[in-house]
Image: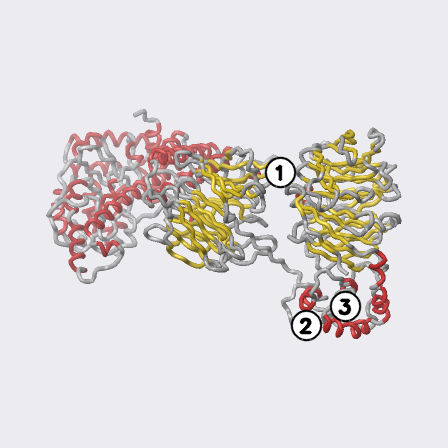
Amino acid sequence: MPCERKPMRYGHSEGHTDVTFDDAGKFIVTCGSDGDVRIWESLDDDDPRSINVGEKAYSLALKKRKLVTAGSNNTVQIHTFPEGDPDGILTRFTTHATHVAFNHSGSRVAAGSSDFMVKVVEVADSSQQKTLRGHDAPVLSVTFDPKDEFLASASCDGSVVIWKIDEQTKVTSWPVLQKSNDVSTAKSLCRLGWQPKTAKLLAVPVGLKVHLYERDSWEHVSTLSDDMMTQPINVVAWSPCGQLLAAGSVGGFLTVWNAESKLCVERQKHEKGYTVCGLAWHPSGRQLAYTDTQGSLGLLDDLPTASSATKTPKAPAVKAANDYDDLFDEDDDRAMDEGLSDTHSPAKRPVAGGDDDDDDDLMPATGRVKNRSSFLDDENSLDTVSLALGQGKYGDDDDAGSTVAPPTGPSLPLRPAYEGPLPTLPQKPFQPGSTPAHLTHRFMTWNSVGVVRGYNDDQDNAVDVEFHDTAVHHAMHLTNALGHTLADLSQEAVLLACPATDELASKLQCLHFSSWDANKEWIVDLPAGEDVRALVLGQGWAAAATSARTLRLFTVGGVQKEIFSLPGHVVSMAAHGEQLLVVYHRGTGFDGDQALGVQLLQLGRRKRQVIHGEPLPLSCKAHLAWLGFTAEGTPCYVDSEGVVRMLNRSLGNTWTPVCNTRETCKGKSDHFWVVAVHENPQQLRCIPCKGSRYPPTLPRPAVAILPFKLPLCQTTTEKGQMEEQYWRSTLLQNHYSFLSSSGYEIDDEGQNQNQKEQQELLMKMFALSCKLEREFRCMELAELMTQSVVTLAVRYASRSRRMNLAQRLNELAMEKANQLQEEQEQEEEEVQEEEHHTPRSRYGQRESAGGHSSSRSHQAREEEPREEEEDESQETETLEADGESRKRLNPFARGAAASPEKPSPKPMSKEGRVNPFKVQGSGKSPSQSRVSNVLDSMTSVRRPAPLGGPSGKQSKGPVLKPLAPKPKTKMQSTLLQMATSKAANKKAQVNPEPAADRLKQPEVPPPDLPVEDSENQKPRTGFQLWLEENRKSILADSPDLQETDVIKAAMGSFRSLSAEDRLSWTERAKGQSGEAADLKKRKRVEEAGEGDESRVKADENIAKKKKSLDTTAKLSAFAFNKN
C-alpha cells in the first residue's frame, strides 16, 4: 500500500532549507535562508517556536538536546533544545559554513565550509579541534562513520574524500562529482549518507544514481537508480534500521530503495516539482520529512518498513533468477487485465529492437515510462519487478548484490538510447521589471515612469502605484479583487491583467488617469480559454499578448484595434512611443539555449515592421531577463548572464553588447536588476541584489548607475580605450537620426557635442598611430574623419615630416569635399522635385497622362542653371579642357570614364532662377572642379605635381590641383598651369563665355584647335603653343591616342626640352618682356631647387620623381607657414 503524502506548508522564505527530527521524534526542526530555526510539534503546528541564528542558516544537526547550526556569519553555533538558548560557538571559519553533522554518540560535530576546510570539534570542549585540509573547492557535505573512525566529505572540486579522523589524513578519494566553483552553483548538494548500525555502506549521490561504497575496501559495490529520475539527486538519508535509503532530487522526485534487494519500494513526486534539499527519517522509520528550495515543509507518512519491503518481492525475484521467461509468462496477462498486481506495479517486457515501432521514445530501452503511463493508475505504487529488470539491463556494477540474474540464452538486440543534445525547457513569459509571481510582496513592474507593487497576504490584496515624478500623477492604492498578476505603467494609464479561473475569464483592466472625462476605467474580457501572458502600454495605445499566440491592440481609451498572430508563445513585450517590441519562442532550444525570435513594429500613421522575426542573440545557456527601450527609444535587453545588448540601426538592425553587469558584481551570487537604460547620458540604471536575483519590496531599494563599456579587445591600452570610447559614442548617437526621421525634435547642441568628441578621439588615435609609424592605419582613421578634421590631419602629418602620408590625406580631403558638395546638391534637387511633383509622384507612382509634360519641365529645369553656372564657376584651364570640354562637362569628375555618353543640346529656358548647383543629366557636376585643394593654399615656388600615386586612384587625365578661389574675384587657373605667382593671379581675369554660345559648339572637338578661339578664351602658354605646332607629329607617331593620352605624351616631350627652349616658347606665347623677366626669375629658382633639370631625358620615371619632390617642397612650405 503506498504511503500518504501530506500537503506541504510554508516554513521559511524562499531559499535553501534543511530538516531533522529530535531523538524522540516529537519535534520536526527546520532552518532556512531567513536565518530562523523553527521547531514544529507536528506538520499541523500553526505556531512553531522560532530561534534566530543569523542572517542565513544553511544546515542544522540535533543530538542529545544540543542543536548545532551552520550559518552565513562564518560560525557554527550551538543552542539548547528545545529551549533554544545560545550555548556558545563551536568553531569559526573564514567564510560561511555549509554543512554540519553529529557523530553517532553526539560527542563530536563535523563542519564543512566554503574556505575548503573540514573541522571536527568536541562538543564538550570546543578547543579540541581537528582540521582536515585537502579539498580545492568549497565543501558540500560531511558525514561520520557510525563507528567514529572515518569521516566522508564531498566538495565542489568534484571529489568525495574519506578521512582518518584521529590521524587527520586522507584515506581515499573518488572524483565522481561534477565540478563547480561554489555551493550555490553546484548541480547537486551531494549530501552523503553512511549506513547506520553496521556502517558497511556509504551512499554517494552521483548524477541520477546513488553509488554505494563498501567500508574498509572502499570499492564501488552497487548502484541504485530509478528511471523516473530525470534530474540529479540532491540528498540521501538512511532509515534508522539501515535497510532503506531515501533520496530527493533536483526535479522534486522522492525515491526509497531497499538497500539489500536494490528495489524501489516507494516513489513520490513533489506537488509543485521544486528541488528537494533536506531529508530526515523519523526514529520509528515510518515517516520521512523533506523541505524544498521554496521554504516549504512536507511529510511522507506510513512508509513501508524494511521487513514489509523485502517480503513481497522475494518470491518473484528468486523466480526471475531461476527462469527469466517464466516471470513474464505468469504476470503479464494478469497485469494488463487487472491494471495492477497485488502489491506492485505491473511488470513489463523488455523492449526489443523489432517489438516496438515507436521510434520517438527517447527513454532507455526498458520502455518503462511509456508502458507505465498507458495502464498504471496509481503513480505511487511499487514497481519492483520492472525496476529489477531494468537494473540488470543497464549493466551497473552491482552484480554482487543483485537478485536478478541475466538470461543465460542469447538475448535480442536492444534499441540504442538517444544520446544527442537534449531539448531545453522553454522560458516562461514575464513582465519586464517584475519579480516572481509566487512572492507575497512583489514588484509588478518598475520602469522609468514609476513602480507598481503587488501585495497578496492574509491582511491585504492590493496594488500600489507610485510615480517617480509626482507631477505626472499622485500615488494610487488599488484593491486587487480580480487577482491581477501583470501590470504596466505609462504617463497616461495603468494597465493590469489577471489570469482566467474556473468561473471568470481572463481580464484586461486599464485605469486611464490622464483622460479628461469622468470615466477613467475600462475592462475587457478575453475569449474563453485565452489568458493574458504579457502586456504593454505605448503612446495612446495598449497591447496584450495571449496564450493563443495572439497579440491584441487597443487604444488607451478602450477601442479594440488590430489583432494578429505571433509565430510562437510570447516571452515578453516592451513599448516606447509608437514602437512595439515583441520577443517570442520561435522553436525549441537545445543544451540549455533558448530559441527566441524578435519583432519590432512601428504603430504610427504608416504602420510597418522593422525587424521581421530574426533570432534574438543570447549568451550561452542564458535566458532573457529584461526587455525594454532606452529613454531615447532604442530597443535593448538583458540576459541572465548580465549582458546588455542594444539595437544598432546603422549596422542593419544588429544587436551590440554595450555592458556586462557581471563584471561589476562583487560576489558570484550577486546580480544587478535592470530598471532603465539611458543613452544621453550613457547610464544603465539598476538595483544591486546581494545574494539574489531580485530586490525586496521593503525597504525601497536604491538605484545604482553603471557605465557602458563595449567588449572590445585590449581596453587596458591607450589605443583600445580610445577605440572603445569612439565606437560607443558612435553607437549611442544613432538615436538622433532615428528621432529626427520620426518627426521628433532633437538636441542639436548635444548631437554637435557628440560629433565633436568623436572627431577629437579620431585625431588622438591619428596622432598615436603617427607616433607608432602606422601610416596605413592613419589613412584608415582619416576615412572616418570629416573634411575639416582631415585638413588638420594633413597639417599634423606635414609637421611630423610624413610627406607621403600628407599627400594621401590631401587627396582624401578633396574627395570628401566633393562628396559633401554632391550631397548638398542632391538635397537641393530633392527639395525641388518635391516642390514640382504632384502628390501621386511623391509616393513613387509614375503619372502616365502627364509624363511628357513632366519630362519637358524637368529638362527645362536642367538647362536653366547652366548660364549661371558658367558665370559663377571657376573654369578649369587645361588643354584637355580645351579639347574635351565640349565633349565632357567635367573630364575629372567621378564616373567620367564609365559614362562616355555625350549630353545632347537642349533648348534654353531663361525664365526665373533655379538651383545653381543642379546636377547635370549625365551625372557629372561642373562644380566639382571648384573644390579647393588643401595643398593649393601653400606658398610654393615649385611647379605643382598632379594628384595620384602608386596606390592612389587612377584618372583618365592628369589631375592637377586648382587654385582656391578668392572671395569676390573670378580667377582663371588651368589644371596644367605649371607655375603660379601673385602677379599672374591678379591679371588672369577674363569674362567667361556665355552658356548659350557653349551649347552651340560642336560636341566633338576637331583635331586642330583654331588659334583664334584659344586666344579669345584665355592667355596662351608656351606649352599650348608648342602642342599646337607639334600635335600632328605626335598623332602621326601614335594615331590611336585619345586626347588625354596626347596631352600626356606632349607634356613628357615638352619637359624633355632644355630650359632655354621652354623659356623661348613661353616668351613667344606671351610676347611681354615683364612676364618674360618673371619667368627668368622662376627659372633660376627651379634650376636651384631641381638641379640639372636641363639634362633630364624624356622618361616617365624621372618625371614622377620630380613630382614627389615638388609635393615635398609644397608640403614643407605649408606646414611651416605661420599664416
Mark earlier in primary sequence (2, 1): 2
Question: Which amino acid type is marked by label 3?
Answer: Ser
The residue at which mark 3 appears reads as 341
Q: Nearer the viewer, residue 712 or 527?
A: 527
**Where residue 549 sits: x, y (%)?**
48, 58
Split into 4 quadrants, where in the image is the C terminus? top left
444 shown above or below 601 = above
Residue drawn at (15%, 58%), measured in percent from left and top? 853
Q: Nearer the viewer, residue 362 or 420?
A: 362
Question: Which amino acid type is marked by label 1?
Answer: Gly
The residue at which mark 1 appears reads as 691
**Lateral position of residue 135 relative to residue 573, left or right:** right
**Where residue 684 sits: x, y (%)?**
49, 37
What is the C-alpha distance between the residues marked 2 and 3? Answer: 23 Å
Question: Which amino acid type is marked by label 2?
Answer: Asp
Q: Nearer the viewer, mark 2 or mark 3?
A: 3
What is the C-alpha distance between the residues marked 3 and 1? Answer: 50 Å
Q: Residues within 10 Å of mark 3 (few under 14, many from 20)?
A: some
When asked about the image quadrant of residue 874, the answer is: top left
Mark number, residue 356 = 2
SS state under label 3: loop
**Lateral position of residue 945 relative to residue 263, left or right:** left
When asked about the image quadrant of residue 208, the answer is: bottom right
Mark earlier in primary sequence (2, 3): 3
Q: Nearer the viewer, mark 2 or mark 1?
A: 1
SS state under label 1: loop
**Lateral position of residue 818 relative to residue 325, left or right:** left
